[in-house]
Amino acid sequence: MDQSKIRNFCIVAHIDHGKSTLADRIIEQTGLLTSREMQAQILDNMELERERGITIKAQTVRIVYQAKDGNEYIFNLIDTPGHVDFNYEVSRSLAACDGAILVVDAAQGIEAQTLANVYLALDHDLDVFPVINKIDLPSADPERVKNEIEDVIGIEAQDAPLISAKNGIGIGEVLEAIVEKIPAPGGSPDNPLQALIFDSVYDSYKGVIVFCRIKEGRVRKGTKIKMMATGATAEVVEAGYFGAGQFIPCDELTAGMVGYLTASIKNVKDTAVGDTVTDVDNPCAEPLPGYKKVNSMVYCGMYPADGAKYPDLRDALEKLKLNDASLNYEPETSIALGFGFRCGFLGLLHLEIIQERLEREYNLDLVTTAPGVIYRVYKTNGEMIELTNPSNLPDPSEIDYMEEPVVSAEIMVTTEFIGPIMQLCQERRGRYISTEYIEASRALLKYDLPLNEIIYDFFDALKSRSRGYASFDYELKGYEQSKLVKLDILINHDEVDALSFIVHADSAYERGRRMCEKLKDEIPRHLFEIPIQAAVGGKIIARETVRAMRKDVLAKCYGGDITRKKKLLEKQKEGKKRMRQVGNVEIPQSAFMSVLKLDDN
Amino acid sequence: MTTRKQNARRPAGLWPARQTGDNMRELSIYIHIPFCVRKCLYCDFLSGPAFDGEMESYVNLLQREIKEQSIFYGDHRVVSIFMGGGTPSLLPAKETGRILERIRDGFSLAEDVEITIECNPGTVTSQKLKNYITYGINRLSIGLQSTEDEELARIGRIHSYRDFQQTYAMAREAGFRNINIDLMAGLPGQSLASYRKTLERVAALSPEHISAYSLILEEGTPLYVNQREYTFPDEEEDREMYELTGRYLGEAGFHRYEISNYAGEGWECRHNKVYWRRGDYVGFGLGASSMVNNVRWKNPDEHMSYTDCVEKMGDGGCDGRTFESGSAPYITRLKEKSYVEMLRRTGRCEVQILASEEQMEEFMFLGLRLTEGVDQEEFRRNFGKTVEDIYGKQIRSFLEKGLLEREGKRLRLTPRGIDVSNVVFAAFLF
């Protein structure tokens, strides 16, 4: 393949500005195979695949474009995750590209994520060209948006294609712009192999399938490869590229190409996103820059609802980690919940995705404890510990001071909502930095916010207070000293470790009170009265009581239908089994998640 | 060596020796009559209004079923018959007569057999009641529920207190010497005072037996669906009503012998106790339940399937494979497998051979409903293990919590244990 005819790119956009729709249109209006490859395939079959390719959205795909200059070009469209939680993944995907298409909504203009993503792309030295989408909307104002792009981002936008991805307008122009404005990949096939891992999936037959961009050299079946950061080695079994929704093997991947490798890699820890693949026999001198071990920002405990499923949970986490270098976990035990894992995530969305995948794809019933951030605890003896599990907080007498992570947040908002949003940020202990006006009616608010104030529901609150108009992006700024306390929950006078959480001293009382109220509703009545208490440092700050059960009796048993009666008793017993025993009290699993719903009405 | 699992599947006592003096086994019969004038708002039993001719054709089916089934019970003697519903008293007297006639044809009845029919006030005439006596029915169970007409109307009963008084008087006049009155506590709008009034009036009539149930809101019933529109006594009041029932009826000469059943000396319901003591009983009719020899089954609860089921009894119920030639086709002589096969072949539902664990569970949660409780000796005789071996942990915990108490060899619920009996019962399940 002629290297000068390859274009590796991605699409960056604010959420809902039309990234996936544009990707679909590009795939639709190009081919999946070169004319040479086409002869070996049955066309009808490929049509089918093509259809599937469109439905399987937002994956890396190789397509073929017949350009106006008469040449056939290979486009590798690399998908990037669209959420702030996944910034590292985004950065590695960007590093696999040579250019990026910036999609901006013709009506809404630049949003917080537009900025974050485009700066990220520019940081990776990508050539970025803008397209203005949704020009068919009545409220579209392409000229204003073009000026905005030039003023705010500082990239040329006057000749940006004006398109409607939804209605297929202007797509041809975009395809030509890809050929013209995105540079062909550099690198030489004759150099030692240097390939960037930007994603991977686990396949139960092939083992780990590594998605990579070949920066230098070549790789083919039989090549002995080495992952430079993890040190793992393996022999390539198959190399290929990405059809739409399928893997298509090929003889060789060479510099400039994007494709996949399989090498019977069974150990999922061996293929970290961002790592460099090289040839064992002819290694490159240095790994590609930018690899880092991803740090989790949010932690929570995950426990199997059925204790016997602990090994299943461990296996499932291990498999998920294959695709997700940013998922961290280590075993922990809880008095209330038994054996489980303390899991680290990039953010709350990431946590929710993992939780949902564990439940859906691995059929696991989970109990998740309240998510928290990593706190730094400076002890009086000079030692510092990073606290991910509130239960491990040292005795207050041993603590000198504590620090919590703080993020720099940028909130883009129309001016009418500045008031409510500023109020929200104040409530969340935000520190005001600045207001920058993008245009007369829109401003970029900058705040420093404690991470633990935004991990639960900040985004929802933001949307509801701005009627959906505010957009939000953040990055970790660092750690700051803070007045933090551990809030403990005592049920029937026993402290329940899995319910403890770290909270700012000023909101401890309010949170404790609401926690007790929630738990009162969650815990069923027992034969005895159950006090539920919230405590800080051994001092009770709130209390509720679950009254003793007065009556649980079934009267009639009709015509000797004992089976029906027994079923009712079995149901009762079954319900009991799904509870967690803490002391004498049976706590339903949902109670452990109730802290997440504290802000519900 | 047999595995635990195999052991678990085998019923412990094959053919428990509850036998009459002449080596005949005791059997009770339940007959289900799924008809009523109108469904009460709390009712989730199998019943509904009948259309023309439906009762007669239903009785025809019942007759066939009784006939086909009777051949299995040649070594059983019937000690009680219970006609329940629905409202069995809705059947024309002659239909009731046809059912009992067929039972007498096919089964051997004990001399002192207890034959009960359920009846609702306003559905019987003096003549019908006299006919019942002629057919040998010797116990009448009248569904009163409350003596307050407003309370009756609220739960969709079709009768008034006055209707009941007439029915009761007619029944005595017709010669019924054994009458039960059904009452309900916890009705919408019911107060402790109005409930006490019901108790007073009913006790004053000196029936032989009183059943007093707490209303249970069954899912799907109108009362359940519209529960927000009613005011129910709270749990505390419900328990006060329960406590009052025991105390008041006790003073009036009725003793509680089961969680919800009270009787004058010597008038406990024999049929009822068969269920709690796990005696053998066979049910005929739509959806009727049976347990014979530690095998439970149910008839289908849809008319079509029930009809099918009865029709299959004629040809496939006992074919050549089931019995050795020349031997009487008694159910007790069937091998377990062919027994179950026969039940399944005829379309019976929920056929279940009770493993010994299941028998133990039932022994406990049924036996503990009786105020006499369970006999630990009997447990050991039946299962070859002491109740301590099997349930030691649960029993100790409940004794400690004051939910169970011991008296001699017997183990029974305390008053507090009765209030939360489901908690206790559930703990005896494996």
Image (spheres, coloured by chain):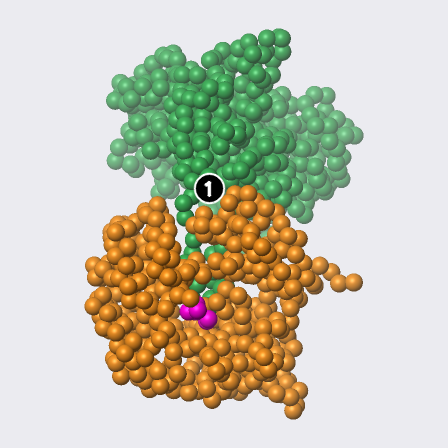
Say which residue label 1 marks: A526
Chain B: its colour in the image is orange
Q: Nearer the viewer, residue B212 or B410?
A: B410
Q: Specify the segment rendered in magenta.
A: B266-271
Residue A518 in the image: state x and y as whole percent. Answer: 40, 34
Q: Nearer the viewer, residue A264 or A502?
A: A502
User: Does residue B189 lie above or below B266 as drawn?
Assistant: above
Q: Chain of mark 1?
A: A
Chain A: its colour in the image is green
User: For the stretch drawn in magenta, what is the main secondary structure?
Assistant: loop
Residue sitting at x 40%, y 16%: A506
For the residue labelled by badge 1, is the local secondary structure a helix, a strand or a loop? loop
Q: Is residue B270 magenta?
A: yes
Residue sitting at x 73%, y 28%: A231
- Horizontal side of residue A462 vs A254, given as left or right: left
Residue sitting at x 54%, y 76%: B26
Disc 1 marks a residue whose amino acid type is: His
User: Does residue A203 lie above or below A276 as drawn?
Assistant: below
Residue sitting at x 66%, y 87%: B324
Rendered image quadrant of residue A226: top right
Residue A13, can we see it?
Answer: no
Residue B98 in the image: state x and y as whole percent. Answer: 38, 87
